[in-house]
Image (cartoon, helix red, strand yellow):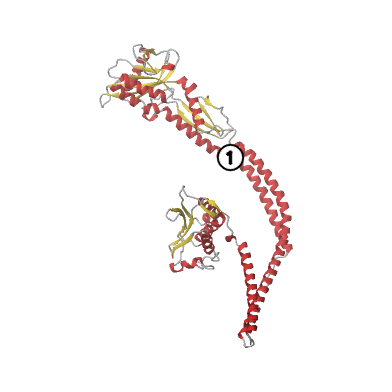
Amino acid sequence: MIRRFVPFSSLIIWVSVGFTLSVGTLIWLAYRSTTNWKQSAALVSRASTEVAIDLLFTTLTRDMRAVQSNVLFSLARASEATPSTLNLQVIVSAFARYPYPEVFFVKSSLQDQLSFYGRSDRRPAWLEEDRTSEQTFPVTVGHNSRVGRQILDRVKEDAETGQQFSVFDLALRDGRSYQVIASMTYEDVFRERPRTIVGFMVDLDGIRTNYVPNIVAEVSRTANLRRDVAFTILDEREGRVAGAPLDTRSPMSRRSFPLLFIAPSVIAPGSLPSSAHAWTAVAMASESSALRAAEAGSRQALAVSTVAALTLIVALGVTLRAVRARTQLVQLRSDFISAVTHELKTPVAGIRALMDMLASDRVKTIAMASDYARLAVGEVRRLARLIDNLLAYARVTDVTEIYSREPVDVRLIVTECLEHFWPQLAEGNFEQYLEIPLDLPPVNVDRAAINLVLSNIVDNAIRYSGDTRDLTIRISLDDKRKMLLIDVADRGVGIEEEKISDLTTANFSATQSRPGGAGLGLTIANRIVSDHGGTLAIRSARGVGTTVTVALPVV
């Protein structure tokens, strides 16, 4: 057989062209990476701020509406039952859970005026303590006829229209401003006669100085966002109420919310108090975020690209030497094959000659036959030694025979395999269905070898797909056999059942209409799986599709 080799000078030209293209591509990629890195980092930072602002917004709005939704109804029922005892129990629990109510108030059908309940540790100056009540709870019980009358007059205006809630602002003589939230229950279904009035008062100045800053600090601490995201709360005039100073240069996300301690949906239209201004919650990427790290990363990318370009220059010389060495290696391989062929022919020829002598009538004595037999045995041993050497050489150079086993998560191998085939899957408009549980045990395998198995199976599924281009990968655990089952299914051309056993035979292909394979894929896959103590099973039907199941023992 005559071999034709590419001239060495032509190889140099092609290598030089490839080197030039590689260096140019590397420089272009470096330029693109430095210009796009910051944009990508900004998108990542923006995504982080979106998650953080959603957390702060949800926490803040839910907490502001919690007293109205969780406490007022219980307080109204307690007031109807036994006001003196149950009221205090409900109010003490509410004071312990929620920091923003400063005072609760109650009026049942048996009372002429409002009863006020304040915190013992921060009793408002206008609340006149009732000295006759027993102080068994950390709550100050008192009254104030003037404040109570202002609240009742305003609540009765809303009660005349049958509203369940009354929300309004209350300004006292001492300059303190409150947002008042009251809930009414009625004696009749037409809501004409109020039976109980319960509610609470929120000090608007305390909201600015204590409540909102504490909520922001708590969310930052519990979510562990201090290093990545900074929060800011702005009032209706864009003034900072809490959090870090606003940095307009950082990526940020904003959410607006009304300063309202009741769900807006339960308020009658046009009944919002003037204090329910639209405040704004802002989440900003902090100094330690990915955006700042991107600047250093882009500089590192340029440095690495420069070093890589210099490395390619050095690699050109090494490649030229490798090309020369490859030419010599091809010649050595040809000489090796010729030598091996000669070495194999020599003992075969000797054995044949000796056997011819023994088969003829020229061997007259047993001694001569014994001598010829000993000579033949020697030639056989020589031939066996040559064959053993060749098998040992093949075993070392065959990658399927050398395994480096380690515990591996099969999900990682599936992911790597699909990433390798994603251009073909995308070009063929394949629908991918993955059924992979999260709690899978590892398998003790050679990662590269099993990757080769899945690659061969997936490659067949892609090549022999018909008009319906579906690829399904399903992983399950067979507890009885202690095996991990990997199913790769397609809805392609399929194959007749009687030919399935031939699929793991070399040089077999499902159909001649699908070029590109030598028929070795499933043969190699079956060998690797068998070497790992597993099994490979195939189910297929013409025009329906094929399912290949690989079973691997778990660790």
Q: Position of residue 375 (x, y in %)?
A: 65, 78
**Residue 184 seen in the current view:** no
Q: Seen in the image, is 7 located left or right of residue 431?
A: right
Task: Give the image quarter of residue 366.
Answer: bottom right
Q: Seen in the image, is 70 located left or right of residue 546?
A: left
Residue 144 position (above or below residue 60):
above
Q: Could you tell me how many numbered marks the image carries?
A: 1
Residue 286 position (above or below residue 508):
above
Of 299 and 451, nearer the camera is 451
Q: Callout 1: 10 Å neighbours few (<14), some, many (20+)?
A: some
Of 440 and 455, nearer the camera is 440
Say what amino acid the circle numbered 1 marks: Ala
Quadrant into which the N terminus falls: bottom right
Q: Position of residue 24 (x, y in %)?
A: 68, 51
Q: Position of residue 11 (x, y in %)?
A: 71, 61
| Residue receiving disc 1 | 41
**Residue 243 seen in the current view:** yes
Name the residue: 62% across, 86% down.
Answer: 360
Q: Residue furthest left?
A: 188
> SS class of the residue under badge 1?
helix
Q: Position of residue 54 (x, y in %)?
A: 48, 34
Name the residue: 45% across, 20% down.
Answer: 204
Of 355 and 179, nearer the camera is 355
Q: Seen in the image, is 386 located left or right of residue 50?
A: right
